[in-house]
Each structure stands twice: as C-alpha cells, then as structure tokens.
Image (tube, rainbow, N blue to C red):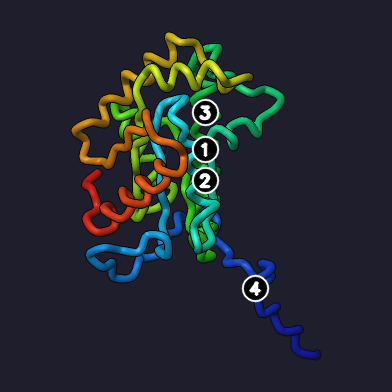
Amino acid sequence: MPPPPPAPLDGGTGGQIQLPPGAVVPTPAPAAVPAHPDVAHTGVAVLLIGPAGAGKTTVARYWAERRPVPTASISLDDVREWVRAGFADPRAGWDDRSEAQYRLARRTCGFAARNYLANGISCILDDAVFPDRPAVGLGGWKRHVGPGLIPVVLLPGLDVVLERNAARTGTRRLSDEEVATIHGRMAGWYGSGLPIIDNSRHDVATTARMLDEAVARSLSSPPAW
C-alpha cells in the first residue's frame, strides 16, 4: 500500500493559524515594553468603551486605519446587526432575547479578535460596557479576548452624545431619555482606574492621538481591572 500523501504545509487552513475549537487562545505575550513604548508599532488588543454617541466606532476605525502595523476594527453593534430576521431591537426594551443576541455577538467578536491576534494582526473593539455590570462587561471581554486586552473609556459630555445621537438613523438612534440614562451609568467609570478620554471638544484625529497615549500608559503600567 503506498504511503498517504503528505499533509499540506499550511495544515489545510489556507495559511492561517487554526484555532482549537471552543478554546480560548491567550493574547500573545508582548515583548518587554520600554518606559515610553512606540504604540504605533506595538501589537495590541484594545477595547474602546463608551455610551451611544461617544464616537467609539468612528474613532476606532480612524485609529486602526492609520496604524503602521496591520490592525482590525471590530464593532459589536455591527456584528449584532448581522441578525436580519429576528433581530432583537434594543429600542423595544432589553429582554432575554436581546441579551442572548448581545452575548452571541460578543463571543463572535472575541473569536474574531483572537483569530486576528493569532495571525499577527492587532485589533480594536468597541462596545457600550457598563461599570455596574463588570461580570457581563469587562469580565466577559477578558474571557473572550484574553488577559492582554487594554480597556479605554471614551466619555464626552451629555450634550455632545445627545447631539450625535440625534444625527443617527435606524436602530442606532435611541431616545434622549435612553441616551441620558446610558451616559449617567457610564460616569461610573470615573474612579475605576481605567483611562478615560473626554473627546467633547476634540476632533477624531486628536482623539485618536489621545487613544495612542492612553494605550501607551496602559502598556507601561497596566490598570488593575
């Protein structure tokens, strides 16, 4: 009997690293970080937190597009809206179905982030994580992405998020009451030890530079969370 043909050099994965099914792949351990790390050339996984209208997705995409190393931008809202038929619209109220779809979207984002990281691509995720639900929010993201995840809070003033929300359409636009409630809950991040950026008076480019600075500080001195 002739010997079996040799296995493909790439393991049959098309040149990509195959993730073990159902297992959490730890974030690759970074090299020793200097006192003032060059964030632009450092592989990282960032979680950008903020209320609706904070500009999370806009800032995340701008930041990712301009890094000199490969970087992916992953928005939880975009992934959640992959559900077309049967979409649980959060404007109709938060219930078991919307909670289940949120958790599914977060796991999907986490898997995508681990896959990118395992293949040498940094990533930035954005989500409205509440400080009064740490087990669901930060704890869940750490489990899905890995312990190297760097959380940064984007928190402009209420007047700014109300104005930005008013310019939205579709499922992304919330009532003023909902926006005010979410913004109030987000204020709980103050005193948490996480880096907080108030981008009320800053354009996207300036906010992205501030994000670089926050990430650099977190790399040099990781916050306890």
Q: Which mark is nearer the camera, 4 or 1?
A: 1
Which quadrant is home to the C terminus?
A: top left
Quadrant of image for the N terminus: bottom right
Q: Amino acid at mark 2?
A: Tyr
Residue drawn at x 28%, y 67% as measured from the top left:
33
Disc number for residue 11: 4
Q: Is residue 128 left or right of residue 21?
A: left
Please determine whether, in this image, residue 140 is positioned above or below residue 17.
Answer: above
Q: Can you identify the residue that label 1 sits on?
A: 58
Q: Give the residue type at disc 4.
A: Gly
Mark 2 lies on residue: 62
**Residue 50 position by quadrant:** top left
Tell me the distance, in whole angstroms, between the alpha carbons under discs 4 and 1.
37 Å
User: Can you see residue 222?
Assistant: yes
- Residue at horizontal 21 percent and vertical 55 percent from the top: 221
Mark 1 lies on a secondary structure that is helix
Residue in the image at 30% along x and 63% along y: 37
Closer to the chain start, of discs 1 and 3, is: 1
The answer to which image quadrant residue 89 occupies is top right
1 and 2 marks in contact (CB < 8 Å): yes
Alpha-carbon neighbours of circle 3 within 10 Å: few (<14), some, or many (≥20)? few
Q: Position of residue 85 (x, y in %)?
A: 71, 24
Contact check, label 4 and label 2, Cβ < 8 Å: no
